[in-house]
Image (spheres, helix red, strand yellow):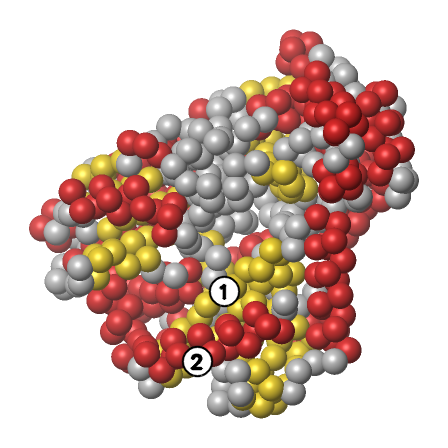
């Protein structure tokens, strides 16, 4: 990597975008060493999740030049791998999304790759759907999921509608490394590319086929009379993202029409003015919805993140609203799917459910109860998608019943190969209706599962390490944990250290370390692949909720010291 000041001068000499050039000149004039270093100390890494970073000028930022360089590398890979390649492209509501889409489509067109573009903002699952529905060679979605407003990203997909494989990411990364951001990227005028048919708009029929696929994969045994006898009432927020039209369309077609949308979070807005972190895991993001619930008194609050691949739920619990965790919702949905399918007489022993190594151990209890095969994979929904694809390739895709990860991503059905908040919103509502007929809400249903299987509680701690100094510190922490692992955590002996960098259980190598504690509790440490963070996943089981929570708190306290 060149000196950061040399890179700054190179960018000032070559950048044509006025906004970026003004930012670069300000850095130069002010001599802000921290800003210069953070913008140029590394290239924004391209991996199986594509690119993700804050919007701005520099090699470590999301801008038309880093996006352009990545697209040239992707185009080189596609042309070397496919004859007459085509790519589906979508974007969520984030700032600069439309600019990045047009930049990408024009570069692909200049490289002879046909770009099929959604004309409006669209959720991640509709992009995954379009790749397979339109028989594309790949896909790209401009999104930073649930990250704060300054972020945007570039998710790359393979022809199976799943995020690209590690092998593809490596090949694309090699091509990117060989491409100069200013002289090595082919491009053409976007409008001219449209006129020549090298960029085509995806029409509404593709979206209609997606809606039909989602509705066909609903899971309910309730009759129309039963549903009419317990109509569901909900408050919904798309968190200023892409979910409004697809979620309400699917729910309405399924007969769920009593939906009140949170007005402040209804319209797409990349600034996310009501919350700094548009993540349905966080109460602050859900607060506007909770406030509206106090007026409307619905059966549940439903929230989708900006690219509508994650969904969160809150329900009345005593005098307050309880936010169900990603693990709790995953367990609830899997249990509901199994109950519903078993009631139809299906043999669940032939079915496959998939979750990750950092998701709840309670799923193992469900597998023992219902007899389905449980597979665990690395963190990242692409690994769940890979398993669905492998089942499909073997002619056994009908065995797949559900996949989820603790970070609020779920999928029931094989219509896409990524998490899908649109189809999951329907499934959650069907499940809520099932329990409403029994006089229960989802908090009641979760309590019953805890009483039956035990109080498996989980917690995820995210610690931030920004900038070049932070990146070095993260690397040092992970190296230290490997070289000198602790003997105990929270006063409990560590009985085993599992380093996933050694291909544990046949899984790919991963920068993840697991500490198994005496008594069955554990902690897992993993650097985030998309943010400058280390995540600590904590698992505890207790005789009741209080005991499990006390164990979580104790492990958290020790874990924070370990990662300081």
Q: Is residue 516 above or below residue 507?
A: below
The span from disc 2 to disc 1 (Cα, nearest Å) is 14 Å
Q: In this view, does 498 lie to the left or right of 205?
A: right
- Estimate the x, y position of residue 472 in percent, counting from the top left: 76, 58
The answer to whether residue 374 shows anywhere in this view is no
Foreground: 475 or 38? 38
Label 1 packing within 10 angstroms: few (<14), some (14-19), many (20+): some
- Estimate the x, y position of residue 44 in percent, counting from the top left: 74, 42
Label 2 packing within 10 angstroms: few (<14), some (14-19), many (20+): many
For image coordinates 79% across by 21% down, the residue present is 15
For image coordinates 45% across by 75% down, the residue present is 552
Quarter-of-image position of residue 98 = top right
For image coordinates 32% across by 77% down, the residue present is 545
Numbered badge on residue 551: 2
Q: Name the residue under label 1.
A: 460
Q: Which of the two labelled residues, at mark 2 and mark 1, occupies the earlier sequence position? A: 1
Q: In this view, does 307 lie to the left or right of 227?
A: right
Asked if the residues shown at circle 2 and circle 1 are in contact, with their CB atoms under 8 angstroms apart, the answer is no
Q: Is residue 177 left or right of residue 221?
A: right
Quarter-of-image position of residue 142 = top right
- Estimate the x, y position of residue 464 in percent, counting from the top left: 60, 55
User: Which SS class for mark 1?
Assistant: strand
Tell me the quarter of the image containing the C terminus: bottom right
């Amino acid at each position: 990597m060149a000196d950061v000041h040399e890179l700054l001068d190179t960018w000032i000499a070559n950048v044509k975008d006025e906004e970026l050039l003004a930012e670069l000149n300000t850095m130069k004039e002010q001599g802000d060493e921290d800003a210069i270093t953070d913008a140029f100390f590394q290239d924004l890494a391209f991996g199986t999740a594509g690119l993700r970073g804050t919007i701005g000028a520099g090699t470590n930022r999301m801008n038309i030049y880093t996006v352009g360089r990545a697209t040239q590398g992707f185009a080189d890979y596609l042309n070397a791998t496919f004859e007459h390649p085509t790519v589906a492209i979508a974007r969520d509501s984030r700032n600069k999304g439309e600019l990045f889409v047009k930049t990408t489509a024009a570069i692909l067109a200049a490289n002879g790759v046909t770009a099929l573009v959604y004309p409006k903002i669209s959720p991640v699952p509709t992009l995954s759907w379009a790749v397979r529905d339109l028989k594309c060679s790949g896909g790209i979605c401009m999104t930073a999921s649930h990250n704060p407003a300054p972020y945007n990203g570039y998710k790359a997909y393979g022809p199976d509608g799943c995020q690209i494989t590690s092998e593809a990411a490596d090949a694309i990364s090699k091509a990117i490394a060989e491409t100069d951001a200013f002289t090595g990227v082919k491009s053409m005028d976007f409008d001219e590319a449209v006129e020549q048919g090298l960029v085509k708009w995806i029409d509404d029929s593709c979206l209609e086929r997606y809606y039909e696929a989602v509705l066909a994969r609903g899971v309910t045994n309730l009759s129309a009379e039963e549903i009419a006898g317990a109509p569901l009432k909900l408050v919904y927020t798309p968190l200023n993202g892409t979910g409004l039209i697809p979620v309400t369309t699917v729910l309405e077609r399924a007969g769920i029409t009593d939906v009140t949308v949170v007005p402040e979070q209804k319209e797409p807005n990349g600034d996310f003015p009501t919350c700094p972190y548009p993540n349905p895991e966080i109460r602050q993001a859900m607060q506007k919805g909770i406030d509206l619930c106090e007026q409307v008194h619905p059966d549940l609050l439903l929230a989708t993140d900006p690219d509508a691949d994650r969904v969160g739920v809150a329900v009345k619990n005593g005098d307050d609203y309880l936010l169900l965790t990603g693990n709790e919702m995953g367990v609830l949905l899997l249990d509901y799917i199994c109950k519903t399918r078993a009631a139809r007489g299906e043999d669940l022993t032939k079915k496959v459910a998939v979750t990750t190594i950092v998701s709840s151990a309670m799923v193992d209890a469900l597998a023992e109860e219902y007899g389905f095969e449980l597979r665990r994979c690395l963190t990242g929904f692409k690994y769940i998608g890979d398993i669905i694809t492998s089942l499909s390739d073997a002619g056994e895709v009908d065995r797949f019943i559900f996949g989820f990860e603790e970070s609020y991503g779920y999928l029931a059905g094989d219509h896409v190969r990524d998490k899908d908040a649109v189809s999951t919103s329907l499934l959650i509502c069907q499940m809520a209706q099932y329990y409403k007929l029994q006089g229960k809400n989802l908090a009641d249903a979760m309590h019953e599962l805890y009483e039956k299987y035990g109080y498996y509680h989980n917690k995820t701690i995210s610690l931030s390490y920004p900038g070049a100094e932070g990146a070095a510190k993260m690397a040092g922490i992970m190296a230290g944990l490997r070289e000198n692992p602790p003997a105990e955590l929270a006063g409990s002996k560590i009985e085993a250290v599992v380093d996933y960098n050694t291909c544990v259980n046949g899984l790919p190598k991963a920068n993840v370390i697991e500490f198994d504690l005496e008594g069955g509790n554990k902690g897992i440490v993993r650097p985030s692949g998309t943010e400058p963070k280390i995540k600590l996943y904590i698992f505890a089981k207790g005789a009741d909720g209080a005991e499990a929570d006390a164990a979580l708190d104790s492990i958290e306290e020790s874990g924070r010291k370990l990662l300081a």
